[in-house]
Amino acid sequence: MGDHKRKRSQKNNNNNKPNPPLAETMDFQISVPGVADADADAELYPSAADQPSPRRGRGRPRKPGKLGDGPAVSSRAGENGDCVLAVNAEPLQQMAVLTSPPPPRWEDVVKVVPSMDAVVKVFCVHTEPNFSLPWQRKRQYSSSSSGFIIGGRRVLTNAHSVEHHTQVKLKKRGSDTKYLATVLAIGTECDIAMLTVNDDEFWEGVSPVEFGHLPALQDAVTVVGYPIGGDTISVTSGVVSRMEILSYVHGSTELLGLQIDAAINSGNSGGPAFSDKGKCVGIAFQSLKHEDVENIGYVIPTPVIMHFITDYEKNGEYTGFPTLGIEWQKMENPDLRKAMGMSADQKGVRIRRIEPTSPEFQLLRQSDIILSFDGIDIANDGTVPFRHGERIGFSYLVSQKYTGDNAAIKVLRNSNILEFNIKLATSRRLIPAHIRCRPPSYYIIAGFVFTAVSVPYLRSEYGKDYEYDAPVKLLDKHLHHMAQSEDEQLVVVSQVLVADINIGYEDIVNTQVLAFNGRLVRNLKNLARLVEGCTQEYLKFDLEYQQIVVLQTKTAKAATLDILTTHCIPSAMSDDLKA
């Protein structure tokens, strides 16, 4: 009780004392650059409703415009057009009045990222081929993505953003006009496309984006684009978290890529990634969607971008990224190295297989040990020095070359060191990853629809998980078989259009054709010529799984016209087979 009375007494004594001033002669200023934000003012200077009111018990609010008992505030114009708030710390009993700053001028507003004006929105109408019915196309659909302006009146975006395009339009930031664009080049492997606009108005008042150097780990990046969720430009920030050889989903290739922790969503594709200095260091192109990860996006770095641009400028078209045309094995096991005749100071990788269509097939041999590429030593795990404290797969060195360039390769063969000067070329796959915007080829006889297998065909037939759902033999050829000649194709019976002539063959679907009348089938065009020029009594097709199809030649060719009419098919073969 004594302590309680003592505290009450002290309280009463304090109430009898006058309130001391905050400062006798203290003045200070607060400078707000540019335009003073309303929310910022509300945070710095609470509204009257937040101040204690002596009439609160009566339920009558204080008049607006009063800040309550506090320091007096005034405003004046600064040297750079900034709004300067002058605060005079007077005793709390004096009232303070905040005067409104003068309205800002547009020319005083500073742009945060000037390069954002070069970022455009890409509108594309796609008409994809119909691989199930190759004589027609699917229903058209529209998409939107991002792009950015570079020098030479050109625009860069992703290849998958304009794949199978029928019309492409571009819209600048803050504009209400869409300009028709022309596609100059599409790089399927690197997932980059180059566009241009003929209208001079499109290029007015826009400065092209400048490219920067390859960023380091933990460097800040800003991704700019037009993702889903709105129509205006979007900016997301992050850092470079990883740099390595990545699998490019669209191109089905492996090239240098950057991993960042900034959000990359649908619509961000083709948008630039800027460094903290405002330089473009990459193009957003894909992200990792998995329940165990968050905010993992991937960016095409500047070395890949510059390779694409230089390739187009040198050749007038996109020629692709060269490959070494081999499959190799690591040499990390010491017993394996000793058995291959390698000394203690030698490092390299062993050649497992060589593509018969590659230039390396004429010079290199199986079990050769590649020691170096262009004078750079290759480690036993297939990596080479990249930057300080970093290593990268030696395929990066190959991808820096251009189609037709020469490369010096040092190999170990039978304990002897040999050096070769090899001309690099693009790879030739038995099942190509792309048909490069061409319509699919087909040939029809007696209701049998023949076509050549490609990755888009497998994806169309079996969905995105075609690597699990497609027939095992097709997948084995896709993953492990190599083309033995430049014109070799994998020809299959995709389906059978039911008619009286093909009774009993209706269930044949996606089955490879091995031979016709005892002659091996090299490609679809070869098969069409053999069938069209056949003068024998029967047409005999040898299929895989030891199946055969036998049709009478005269009856089969006569029935083909009726089948085409029934299914509204304009021709028995695609235009590329008629030449």
Image (cartoon, grey):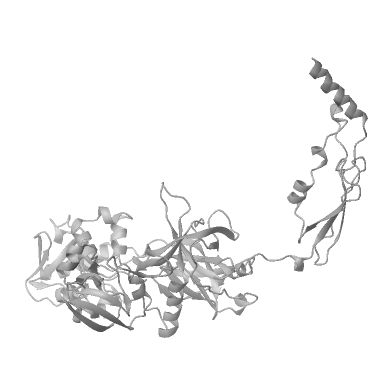
Q: Quadrant of residue 367?
A: bottom left
Q: Considering only vertical position in the picture, is 16 above or below 299?
A: above
Q: Is residue 486 visible?
A: no
Q: Describe residue 493's horizontal placement relative to residue 439 as left or right.
A: left
Q: Residue at x 32, y 55 (%)?
A: 463
Q: Quadrant of the N terminus?
A: top right
Q: Quadrant of residue 436?
A: bottom left
Q: Residue at x 40, y 73 (%)?
A: 187
Q: Describe residue 183's horizontal placement relative to residue 115 as left or right.
A: left
What is the x, y in percent for residue 281? 51, 69
Nearer the observer, 104 or 361: 361
What is the x, y in percent for residue 568? 30, 64
Nearer the observer, 222 or 477: 222
Q: Is residue 56 visible?
A: yes
**How many callouts does the rendering have?**
0
What is the x, y in percent for residue 482? 20, 70
